[in-house]
């Protein structure tokens, strides 16, 4: 049996798109397994994700056939394998809870990824709590003076490993605009979120000082607009006056873990489509 | 501009259904506003909900045209107006928080319903906290001996008012099998839910005695299988050892309110499709 | 049997406070029903709430006896009746969902309050969905030019009715610094909260435009620092790309309702103590 | 500086207990860091947890002094070190997500425990995804015929290692009544929880077949009453019709992880007191 494929597309909303797209698949003998669409009434944009069994048709033939049609509709589109693990580069600093969580989920088959590199600005010993197995580890220290050079090295590793996704798993360095642009659309970051928000260092301590009653985390695509890229997933939970800053950090770890892992899973399964500054997330 | 319509359907899953259905709408000049589908891989069943602008086409003409096609596909289907308020009969006993909440939501336009009757086994004074406005109130007391007769009266009111939906808004009487069958698929009940569950009277007191750390509520369609009908919506929240049974009852009211209101909204917007003992809920 | 009392206090943390306070109550024959304390390690401040049965002792005698002791400990303290309803002034503009919810909770006995006045900058018809019963309604329109005068009228009503608590139940006017200071510590506001936050008008539309995946609400004491007063309670829930701004407004209503009602309940039950810019909330 | 201590106690509720207990600590020069109490109005039982700085006093001297007083009050009590890691035996079968999560939390200092043994009815290879480091691993296979013998071996390991807590981290064997009794009060189990509940094998598949809209997990003390011991912590989250049984299993892992870890943390910090079939949990 041939492997299932995933078609994702976005385009201006016009009558007949669903009929045409699903008609195309039907004519090529494909069988739809899962389909979701979203008509954005405000921007008049259309988004679709279809997982389908191609039957006899090859992915290449389908791509070739779809291309002409897609061109007329001004579509952004992609036909990808559903089961092929995506090559992922993981970046981390001193706190390795997100890294450990992602690697464990990968090992038990929860995340269909192929970790091609772990990059850290700290040496291997800094994340000694995490079993990274055979995944190549790259220690690329960074200072204000060496930032350009270090980022070039990061790009080189991403290029050499053909990384399809870069996950900033608590990588505590701000990417330059150039770097953010280079990884645009394929780089996911996790950061704390609070009501209200806090800028600057030690956000959990700031949140504690402010006396918030909830803390949360946001996973988003990295753009040149720091921490303001399209949001993929968020979660939050209640805290109380009795929670110390350390308690908040501890609770924050759990929220960060699950929010980042969920965002990575959604991305790997081609469930996240960009809609300007926002995302369409077909959760399934 | 003509009013938007909603097509809902379920049928055995076969290649081409989406293409055929959306093709049909396209040929008739209809413009899709919102569409969702679900392919149940286990039962090989297909479910779809499409909100669309019929352009020039009349609902009647579309229904006539769709019927032949639907027959061949063994479809359960329906084409309904999106904006027409559904006629709803509300049933209540002594606790009126769900009733008050539903009526308020109706008044501010949150629920597109037309409350055609309020039926209670208690007199009007029992729910004196609720402003029922001009909605006709029917006091139909019930005893073991008069249950058959009372239920016949309830059916009569439902028939006379052409009630499309019956909401048991904390109506504390168990419907007979006959009554449950009569209202099958159009009667929503709310009940408390706990981990683990409790049978019998005073469930919040039982939950307190057991020492559970969460309480919840379930809205479901009424079937002849008591409290076991297809689930539409559920929610739960944390409690602590310091919560008395009264605290649980208070917290339970809030959960019941929002779970029932959400289930009613989903039903009124034709977002709930039956899938055997289960539901497919297209949340939008 | 005499009515239960509630002692709340805060003071610098010193050895023996708990022993001294509970010893005082024991010597006066009082029986503790519920007690909570919090030692803030950072500010070295101590907070306590004790609900107790005074047995034979009168509240006045206890207050007199406690005063000398409290003075030596630099305490902020209060001995209040547990069951006496607090006099509450409710302020509202055009959206009356929070008002309706508070009044319903009061009627069924969930909130131990005595609503002494409803003040609105809009006429009675603006909140026609809400049954305000016999609660006096005051229409006090406001313009830029009449703001001083209107606020003086509001203060006059608060004074005449001896209002102990002012609830801004979606009152869409910004209080002047003078007004905020006048009601300091006894005025609760509700506002939307988002991750990240948004300033200015139409916040739900801004949140939708930003593509957030959660919305929430915050209840806080009003201070001269707009929307930045000590937070009493917060809650949030998940949304999706398919939620329109109207959907967010609808979901926001539910969150605002329950967050404000909970904050009011906590305040009425003397469960909220100020800790600088923050609160200590003894949830029970 | 001497190490902080934790006093936990429960006894019949009588006037003056708080005054006497805190007076005792005050007289011995101890400084309270954190204190919580609960008066169970139904059972007239009193519960208290006090973390305190003993200043010059030794734990032994305090215990000796407290014993006489405690005897008169019919107290169950304990004075324990706050920082000493508790010796913990971890039991696991084939699914190691809870084990991996607990060990990671231990390594980064989140759980103050000393893992003295890992016991599994499967060989080491079954949990190859987990880095168990130097923690001794014991493979103790079990069959119907060898259950008595295997359980004796488990008890022997617990005795030899002086295990203070036994955590069933997805150990898929039902303990005999004898074993449950032997570990009574010091053995925590995690199991799935649903609304409604399901008995028997493959619960996530049953939940899917029933069409529930929420799944959850419960951590509880093991008693001879299977899955019915005193509940320590619970959590739940929403699911949809589109979640396959595999999706439920995946989501269940996350809930199980955090619920079990939280229950273990609460126990290790002496925050859980037994109240008959229930628990009093002083969350801090």
Image (spheres, coloured by chain):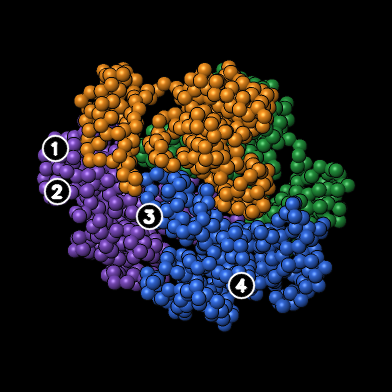
Chain colours: A blue, B green, C orange, D purple
Under circle 3, the secondary element is: helix
Viewer-nearest of labels 1 and 2?
A: 2
Measuring from the top left, give residue D254's x and y in whole percent. 46, 58
State left or right for residue B257 relative to residue C41.
right
Of badges 3 and 4, the one in the foreground is 4
Same chain under badges 1 and 4? The reply is: no
Nearer mark to the viewer, of 3 and 1: 3
Look at the numbered discs 3 and 4 and tell me whether their residues touch, using CB distance below 8 Å: no
Spatial CA span between label 1 and label 2:
17 Å
Alpha-carbon span between mark 3 and mark 1: 36 Å
The Cα–Cα distance between marks 1 and 4, rounded to whole angstroms, is 71 Å
Q: Is residue B15 left or right of residue C204?
A: right
* Residue A119 in view here: no
Q: Which mark is residue B137?
A: none
Instruction: State which chain disc 3 sits on.
Output: A
Residue drawn at x 37%, y 45% as measured from the top left: A242
Between marks 3 and 4, how big is the CA–CA gap? 35 Å
The residue marked by circle 2 belongs to what chain? D
Q: Which residue is mark 3?
A: A246
Q: Which mark is residue D69?
A: 1
Residue labelled with disc 2: D57
* Residue A178, label in figure: 4
Q: Are marks 3 and 2 on the same chain?
A: no
* Mark 3 or 4, nearer chain start: 4
């Amino acid at each position: 049996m041939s492997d299932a494929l995933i078609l994702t597309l976005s385009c201006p909303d016009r009558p007949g798109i669903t009929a045409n797209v699903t008609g195309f698949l039907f004519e090529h003998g494909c069988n739809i397994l899962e389909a979701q669409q979203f008509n954005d009434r405000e921007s008049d944009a259309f988004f679709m994700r279809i997982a389908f069994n191609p039957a006899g048709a090859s992915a290449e033939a389908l791509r070739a056939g779809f291309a002409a049609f897609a061109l007329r509709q001004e579509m952004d589109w992609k036909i990808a394998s559903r089961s092929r693990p995506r090559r992922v580069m993981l970046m981390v600093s001193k706190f390795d809870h997100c890294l450990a969580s992602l690697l464990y989920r990968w090992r038990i088959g929860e995340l269909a990824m192929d970790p091609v590199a772990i990059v850290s600005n700290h040496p291997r010993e800094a994340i000694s709590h995490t079993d990274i197995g055979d995944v190549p580890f790259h220690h690329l220290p960074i200072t204000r003076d060496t930032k350009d050079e270090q980022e070039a090295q990061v790009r080189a590793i991403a290029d050499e490993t053909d990384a399809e996704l870069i996950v900033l798993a608590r990588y505590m360095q701000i990417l330059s605009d150039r770097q953010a642009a280079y990884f645009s659309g394929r780089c996911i970051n996790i950061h704390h979120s609070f009501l209200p928000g806090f800028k600057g260092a030690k956000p959990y301590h700031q949140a504690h000082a402010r006396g918030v009653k909830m803390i949360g985390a946001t996973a988003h695509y990295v753009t040149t607009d720091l921490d303001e890229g399209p949001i993929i997933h968020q979660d939050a939970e209640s805290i109380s006056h009795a929670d110390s800053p350390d308690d908040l950090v501890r609770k924050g770890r759990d929220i960060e873990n699950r929010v980042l892992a969920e965002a990575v899973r959604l991305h790997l399964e081609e469930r996240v489509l960009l809609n300007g500054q926002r995302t369409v997330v077909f959760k399934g």
